[in-house]
Image (spheres, coloured by chain):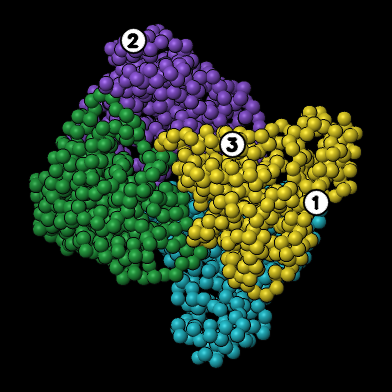
Chain colours: A green, B purple, C cyan, D yellow
Amino acid sequence: MALRYDFASDNVAGAMPEVIEALAAANAGFAGGYGADHVSRRAAELIRAELDADAEVRFVASGTAANALSLAALAAPHEAVICHEHAHIATDETGAPGFFGAGLGLVQLPGQSGRIDPAALARTLAEPEVSYHQSPAALSLTNTTEYGALYSEAAAAALLDAAKAVGLKTHLDGARLSNAVAGGFPLKRLAAMGLDVAVMGGTKAGSTPSEAIVLFDTPLARRFDARMKHAGQLVSKARYLAAPWIGMLESGAWARRAAHANAMARKLAARMPYPIAHPVESNGVFVAMDEPTLQRLRGLGWQVYRFIDGSVRFMCSWATTDEAVEAVSEALAQIR
Amino acid sequence: MALRYDFASDNVAGAMPEVIEALAAANAGFAGGYGADHVSRRAAELIRAELDADAEVRFVASGTAANALSLAALAAPHEAVICHEHAHIATDETGAPGFFGAGLGLVQLPGQSGRIDPAALARTLAEPEVSYHQSPAALSLTNTTEYGALYSEAAAAALLDAAKAVGLKTHLDGARLSNAVAGGFPLKRLAAMGLDVAVMGGTKAGSTPSEAIVLFDTPLARRFDARMKHAGQLVSKARYLAAPWIGMLESGAWARRAAHANAMARKLAARMPYPIAHPVESNGVFVAMDEPTLQRLRGLGWQVYRFIDGSVRFMCSWATTDEAVEAVSEALAQIR
Amino acid sequence: MALRYDFASDNVAGAMPEVIEALAAANAGFAGGYGADHVSRRAAELIRAELDADAEVRFVASGTAANALSLAALAAPHEAVICHEHAHIATDETGAPGFFGAGLGLVQLPGQSGRIDPAALARTLAEPEVSYHQSPAALSLTNTTEYGALYSEAAAAALLDAAKAVGLKTHLDGARLSNAVAGGFPLKRLAAMGLDVAVMGGTKAGSTPSEAIVLFDTPLARRFDARMKHAGQLVSKARYLAAPWIGMLESGAWARRAAHANAMARKLAARMPYPIAHPVESNGVFVAMDEPTLQRLRGLGWQVYRFIDGSVRFMCSWATTDEAVEAVSEALAQIR
Amino acid sequence: MALRYDFASDNVAGAMPEVIEALAAANAGFAGGYGADHVSRRAAELIRAELDADAEVRFVASGTAANALSLAALAAPHEAVICHEHAHIATDETGAPGFFGAGLGLVQLPGQSGRIDPAALARTLAEPEVSYHQSPAALSLTNTTEYGALYSEAAAAALLDAAKAVGLKTHLDGARLSNAVAGGFPLKRLAAMGLDVAVMGGTKAGSTPSEAIVLFDTPLARRFDARMKHAGQLVSKARYLAAPWIGMLESGAWARRAAHANAMARKLAARMPYPIAHPVESNGVFVAMDEPTLQRLRGLGWQVYRFIDGSVRFMCSWATTDEAVEAVSEALAQIR
């Protein structure tokens, strides 16, 4: 029996054809190293245009690195970053923020479907500072969240405003920002929301490994290349991290293919015979499923995983096919 | 006037066609994340075969990261790594070993053309340990060296043996290992020389960003994926860091194209009208050239750089053409 | 109205007379630096005798440093230390383990009165290792706990044995080890319990700032002085961190005065008109008290604090007097 | 034969009587923890008065920690601190700046007798920034230097001004600041010289372990206690690190006893039968002495050490007696 990974994650898919073509196109000739090349410049321009913002842009190969490097630029080692208790930076990055940030702390807040509860944030921001705690220096949001939920512009802005009002810096983990955009989040409003740094996800959107670090707070760009090099994140042939963005943005495929992924998730949700655990607002479907049922599904070859909250996660991507949704739906019906 | 970067570095070249083809081939279908995929497994097998060694292999996007991550696994923060005073890890990596190693120190030794002087190593190894110094825990060699010189098997083994005799771990920065191999270094003897970790360079050999970390000391592989993730070095779509190696090794292009680069350097050296500063044993030609002359060369469009020792460096790569060697030779003759 | 700090903490007391006398005695003459002095040697001998163990001993000025330095020697940056969710290292040390350990993680377990729940530990130890989590490398216990509870020898041994059975290292935060000993914990059994490192608390026992790091696992002592120096923990005039231990141990005051502190807590508990929240097994009394009542108590000048679990903490020390217990008891009765 | 350590270092002496008395005086009663106590406040006031500056003051037990903690507050991990190549932070602190600063680099400059050569500084400050180097963010001076030489106000100001002119922060390692003051350095001019942070040495001046971190740049004090706690440098019974300063400053002994140490060095220099290697401007005498002679001196019981530059160092302290100077002078004459 062939194992099927279609819904295991959105990083099990390959790269979209626009990316492979852009890589081949970028391959011609000689180019300066460490980001000083025409491909990196063009990709950064495209991102600025997409965001309608005068930001500095850098590319790294890992989303974990993109987040951790950003957070280390926003908070000192004896300070903390506020995030959701199930945020990727808190639960799935092997403590990378603490490594990049020399012991940087995380203050983890609750909230439904991965969205930080505003009241919990308010309470945290009101806490008195004491020398034996790592006081918050930054707020990190994830959009869409780890549970596929979407922050609306208003919901995100309310949290960011509360943080900025007391002097915190702000960070967006946009590993699935394309899915948020496809879900209705207004990309060109990011800068206006007062973000200092956003990570704009390429990998899960359908790129070869590449994440864009967008420094809205442009003074942060001072010596940022050295910061990247120091942290092993400045590759010499930088054009290969930038090229995918040319492929994804010039063609519009970054957002368009995320819309496909979201549509596949809606289609799957519509056929899902198990209780849906979180609002299906992007490319994931989380369902309540007991262990024997999950094992039966795996027994049919479908590789999916139980998530932190106990639900079973089905992720769609640019590469998810109608056929796959139908096939897994059939399997799901069969194992009931 | 068009600027020509042909000799600026060996990382200004694009990727060889075998690599682009392998990337495209690896792109098909779904694959597990974080290195648990068929492409990563195949690439690792090819490397083990190439080295004739039962080693664990991991892939990262940056040579700096490959080195620093390795060194942090070999020495504690309060210890030091011995290297040449002009080693890339000491002079060109923005302190990355200190970052990955939480303040890890470097003991920098002299030696001609980037090769560590055995007597200097002996003196260092004989120094008494004191609590106010970072005592050495590892030795790092670079082959070929930053000056294009080659360690013979005997020369490298003598240094490694001296270090291992007093309990040090050993590391090879093989960013240009393909050039060393093309220059006569016996790749299959690496394991027998007692190396703990070697970084096998892909990028400068003609890959898209990829370096192989080869753990000859396989117990080091325990939790190494977590170490990589923690340090922002474990990419989810790992197949794109592994695929280039399939392209380079199955075809033999990794070594064959390095032989071309070395040949281009010899050709350039033969025509060089300036005093050659270091033995031309691989793909670089270093020459004594005063500043006005260098400026005249740059005035003709040729981008080359003055190196740490004051000489001017001309680097050849897999992509260097006979035409380019002739053109730059002509320019060099013209500016005398 | 004079503010009274008698019960605010056990670190608000001064140093016992035996310590001041020992400091004065150690002051005579010249002595080698960085621990190579007769005072440091004598203090280490006394500790070994007290523990009946062939351990290496070092002295530092801060309990946070003693713990964090020890943990960094037991777990790698990409690994974690298991501790109670209210352990001092997790809640009150400003992330110091993450700083000393370059991003070292903590896995925080529940359990009544600060004692780790054995079932929770078993579950954690049974979890599969994945690269995106920091897997445990060590277990840290605190005795007595942050809630004044005592681990019996059997209870501590059961947890340590479970951890050691799967290869973990072990650490004891003994900031209040003297109170544990006074409560019946057999000090000479520590070594037999298989601890790798114990921090033996001086400060809260009645010393000027000094904590002893006891390396039962003596190979850990290799280059430990360099580790301390690197981390800013090796003072040159080390005799002044060692001398207090001569004063406390030669006289028996370390344990005897802890017995006094414990007795004062029992006396206070006996008179406490509020519900007692945790077993009074050492020198602290934790009580359920609403906020208006606490404010009335503070209004009478008594400085005490609400602890993490919401109870109000009264700490006794070597310096707590019968008069103070009676005075605060009277105040407590008065504010009901 | 009794070994004599009188001239081995200035940290082999005990504490001056004023310090021991102040410790005993500070021992009375209860006091708040972590620096919030009357003793810490009083000591900070005395230091501000001594410096005639509105600075924030903190106390730590180790000079290495005082320096490294300060430097980590002035430079980011991917940046560097400029210092003399024989500065204590570069040669004798086991890489502590790199640990506290998460891989912070040091740019080491030459200069006679430990004073940075202004031309070398100018060259360094003029270097273009590149991503593969750690560019300087701060300048660190040591006064008196590791060779007992004194920076005059003008000499120090010239270096500091050059650094500040290009945006660098500034740090003074004042482990022997009392000797500089006794040598004529105007303490009250420090603030006007534009220093951001100075470490004011207590230990070598005759204290029990205590160094004062003086934050002239008071905004640096924000969350500095948390920074200290995070780095294991905030002791709970902080009064014992502050009290020595009350003893040394209220009595004037800090400067007066340093004048004695300097006088002892001058007396020794006057009788020294070997060539003096560095200007005797404070409490050290460095002499050219071959190895057999040094061994003969040690054979007579005198413990002195060969320093980094090859000269033999004789350090005087507050505790150096006329008798000792005479005795060692006699021994020196005898072994010729």
Element on which disc 2 rests: helix
User: Which chain hosts label 2?
Assistant: B
**Sequence order check: which comes first, mark 3 or mark 1?**
3
Q: Secondary structure at mark 1?
A: helix
Residue placed furthest toward the top = B270
Query: Which callout, 3 or 2, points to the residue nearer the camera?
Result: 3
* Disc 2: which residue: B330
Q: Residue at x 59, y 50 (%)?
A: D193
Residue denoted by label 1 = D260
Q: Residue at coordinates 32% horizontally, 26% vertically from top-left?
A: B12
Q: What amino acid is found at the position of numbered circle 3 in the picture?
A: Pro
Please give left or right for residue A237 compared with residue D31 in the image.
left
Q: Are marks 3 and 2 on the same chain?
A: no
Residue type pointed to by label 1: His
- Dots 2 and 1: beta carbons under 8 Å? no
Q: Quadrant of the C terminus of chain B?
A: top left
Characterize the local packing of mark 1: few (<14), some (14-19) or many (20 or more) Cα atoms within 10 angstroms.
many
Q: CA distance from mark 3 to mark 2?
A: 43 Å
> Which residue, given by chain and number where applicable, does mark 3 sit on?
D118
Q: Quadrant of residue D311?
A: top right
Tell me if mark 2 has few (under 14), some (14-19) or many (20+) residues whose alpha carbon lies within 10 angstroms of its own.
few
- C242 vs A2, left or right, is right
SS class, disc 3: helix
Res. C326 mark: none
Query: Could you tell me which chain the residue with mark 1 belongs to?
Result: D
Q: Is residue A56 visible?
A: yes
